[in-house]
Image: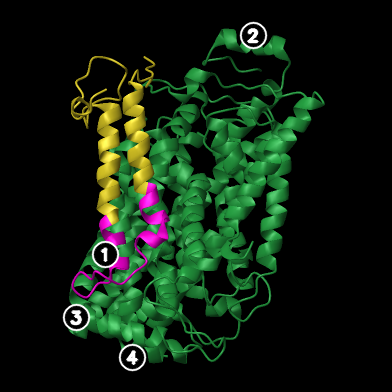
Chain colours: A yellow, B green
């Protein structure tokens, strides 16, 4: 049977997803934010460890967005049914 | 040159193992009808989160990550780290656009972005433009894989000193020939299976190297000091420092545009589409967006290998002895830092990590060619078996085209091959990605924008000297006083021209093409076992029909009958 992933998510969730993904992208796109040596993490200049830390940050942000949009992590695709949302309850909508 | 026996034996064993896996893959999850293009070219669209993770990772992390990026960092320092920023941005972008592309492809049986554009805009010309661009842009990317493999073979001492190009590169040709053979036979299934072996080798090598080599070199403090000492030295050729450990304000525009341009370009590369469309469910792509950054972390470590290599005097001597070819830096690093057996594992990881993506890319280009060029122009009523046969042959031809690129271009910075491909492929972004959301742009305007941007991008790249050649020597050029990656201004030009001409074409009343897609197609998420839309065999006669026929098609719904 054909299913549709039409989610009847509230605009608040879409705004939250947009903001989180924008943060993920802009974090390394805005170079003046991290193009410096200090503070160092051990021998690593800020330029390097900031970007390396941004990698798991992006993963976490994408994960949060996934949970916001799809509910249960391993469940079937959201079909707009009454699936409980793990994280969305924390965001007032 | 002499060959170290131990690493050589290990590489050969790994290669034979992978080859056997590749041929055995024809029996893995066997298809009812292996001669359908979605079976050969998309593995039957049945890959779940786990397999897709390996397959998409294999798309992204290639000889580009192993050879080209560390070579750039080795030579110029922080400027090469844009690759890390680029691979960070890919996944949020994939998260946003991927599911819609997957759904429309599933709903309509598309195997490539070219077909989508053709159906969406009802424009054969636009579909052809997207397909031709995809094929053109993929060739230098495959060429990068050839160059990467070659640099490992050079360090291993494999190859003869013959002046005959064919004889000299025989090991390279054998490696790619064998890979092409099982790709021909088993298609994407073979590569999905081999991706496991490949990634196991890659993760093992990179993590061991990242922990073991710095300790042996006296710690990261020493490594950064050595890198800094080199980068601050003035290059006699240019009169400026070689580079810097932190990006300078003058380099920020180039850094940002290279990262963003590459990330947007990757999404529209045919092989990325192949990886996404092979997923079994719509949410596999988003689920993976949160897990694929593991590969980005590996890329970050690999980029730092450029600095590790700089801290080893024997590597610097080896690079110099080979005409300053910095692409040898990582293989040389393995040779000098690891015992022979582990160097062999590292070499295998790089070689297999180049062969697999090259094969995925050739499949992707073959899918594009078959559906958008062969079926449109040559044989509109091709049977699925004929399509698959053509795709198989084209996947072989792609390798030959790539060889031409590899031989014709300067190999000092092979990353340029990938960047040149990026300039071209990014010009399909408006038609493909904006097309997923709106049909506001007129089909002729999109063709005009594409053509203007392709000419602009190619001319700019042609005029850029570098690496000892006058033309196509680099991919960044000054625009309005800032040095930027040419792909980005070309894309902006593309969108502006498309928008202006859309207004013009609408004003003069030029007709829109017929859109075969429906709004619900973009969010469809059928059960993996559901029978998809029968592959529309003859799209060409059906899609450009007047509205009356369109209504008829709408009535028959997604499982419309074969026009024959």
Residue that carries the numbered disc 1 in the rendered image: A49
Nearest-to-viewer mark from 2 and 3: 3
Is B488 located above or below residue A47 in the figure?
above
Q: Secondary structure at mark 2?
A: helix
Which residue is identified by label 3? B219
Dot 3: what SS? helix
Q: Which numbered marker is on residue B314?
A: 4
User: How far is disc 2 from disc 3 in space, using C-alphas?
Assistant: 71 Å
Q: Nearer the viewer, mark 2 or mark 1?
A: 1
Badge 3 local density, few (<14 within 10 Å), some, or many (20+)? some
Residue B306 colored magenta? no
Tags 3 and 1 in contact by the CB under 8 Å rule? no
Are the residues under marks 3 and 1 on the same chain? no
Image coordinates for residue A76, horizontal then vertical, percent: 27, 25
Whole-percent x and y of residue B473? Answer: 61, 72
Where residue B545 appears, x then y in whole percent? 72, 18
């Amino acid at each position: 049977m054909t299913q549709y992933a039409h989610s009847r998510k509230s605009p608040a969730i879409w705004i939250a997803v947009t903001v989180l993904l924008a943060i993920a992208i802009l974090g390394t796109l805005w170079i003046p934010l991290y193009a410096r040596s200090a503070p160092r993490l051990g021998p690593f200049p800020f330029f390097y460890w900031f970007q390396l830390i941004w990698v798991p940050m992006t993963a976490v942000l994408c994960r949060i967005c996934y949970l916001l949009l799809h509910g249960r992590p391993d469940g079937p695709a959201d079909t707009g049914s009454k699936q409980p949302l793990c994280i969305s309850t924390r965001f007032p909508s | 040159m002499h060959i170290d026996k131990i690493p050589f034996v290990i590489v050969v064993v790994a290669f034979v193992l992978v080859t056997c896996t590749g041929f055995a893959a024809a029996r893995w999850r066997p298809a009812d009808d292996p001669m359908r293009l979605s079976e050969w070219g998309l593995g039957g669209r049945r890959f779940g989160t786990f397999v897709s993770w390996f397959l998409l990772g294999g798309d992204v992390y290639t000889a580009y990550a192993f050879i080209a990026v560390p070579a750039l960092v080795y030579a110029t320092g922080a400027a090469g780290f844009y690759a890390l920023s680029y691979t960070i941005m890919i996944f949020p972008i994939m998260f946003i656009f991927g599911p819609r592309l997957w759904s429309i492809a599933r709903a309509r049986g598309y195997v490539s972005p070219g077909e989508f554009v053709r159906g969406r805009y009802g424009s054969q010309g636009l579909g052809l433009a997207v397909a031709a661009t995809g094929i053109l842009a993929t060739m230098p990317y495959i060429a990068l894989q050839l160059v990467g493999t070659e640099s490992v073979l050079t360090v291993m001492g494999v190859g003869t000193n013959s002046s005959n190009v064919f004889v000299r590169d025989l090991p390279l040709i054998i490696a790619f020939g064998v890979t092409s053979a099982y790709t021909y036979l088993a298609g994407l299934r073979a590569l999905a299976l081999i991706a496991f072996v490949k990634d196991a080798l890659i993760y093992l090598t990179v993590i061991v190297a990242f922990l073991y080599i710095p300790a042996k070199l006296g710690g990261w403090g020493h490594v950064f000091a050595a890198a800094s000492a080199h980068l601050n030295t003035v290059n006699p050729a240019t009169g400026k420092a070689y580079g810097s450990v932190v990006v300078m304000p003058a380099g920020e525009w180039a850094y940002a545009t290279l990262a963003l341009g590459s990330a947007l370009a990757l999404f529209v590369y045919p092989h990325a589409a192949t990886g996404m469309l092979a997923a079994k469910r719509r949410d596999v792509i988003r689920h993976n967006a949160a897990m694929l950054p593991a590969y980005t972390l590996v890329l970050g470590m690999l980029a730092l290998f450029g600095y590790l290599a700089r801290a080893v005097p024997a590597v610097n001597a080896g690079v110099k002895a080979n005409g300053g070819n910095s692409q040898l830096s990582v293989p040389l690093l393995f040779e000098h830092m690891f015992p022979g057996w582990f160097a062999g594992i590292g070499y295998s990881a790089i070689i297999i990590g180049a062969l697999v993506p090259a094969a995925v890319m050739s499949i992707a280009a073959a899918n594009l060619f078959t559906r958008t060029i062969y079926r449109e122009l040559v044989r509109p009523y091709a049977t699925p078996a004929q399509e698959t046969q053509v795709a198989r042959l084209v996947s072989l031809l792609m390798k030959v085209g790539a060889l031409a690129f590899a031989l014709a271009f300067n190999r000092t910075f092979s990353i340029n091959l990938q960047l040149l491909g990026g300039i071209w492929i990014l010009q399909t972004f408006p038609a493909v990605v904006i097309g997923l959301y709106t049909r506001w742009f007129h089909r002729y305007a999109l063709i005009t924008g594409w053509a203007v941007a392709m000419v602009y991008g190619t001319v700019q790249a042609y005029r850029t000297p570098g690496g000892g050649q006058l033309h196509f020597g680099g991919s960044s050029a000054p625009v309005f006083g800032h040095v930027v990656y040419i792909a980005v201004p070309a894309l902006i030009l593309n969108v502006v021209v498309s928008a202006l001409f859309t207004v013009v074409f609408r004003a003069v009343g030029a007709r829109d093409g017929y859109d075969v897609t429906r709004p619900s197609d973009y969010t469809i998420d059928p059960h993996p076992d559901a029978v998809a839309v029968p592959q529309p065999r003859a799209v060409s006669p059906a899609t450009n029909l007047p509205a009356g026929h369109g209504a008829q098609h709408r009535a028959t719904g997604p499982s419309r009958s074969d026009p024959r």
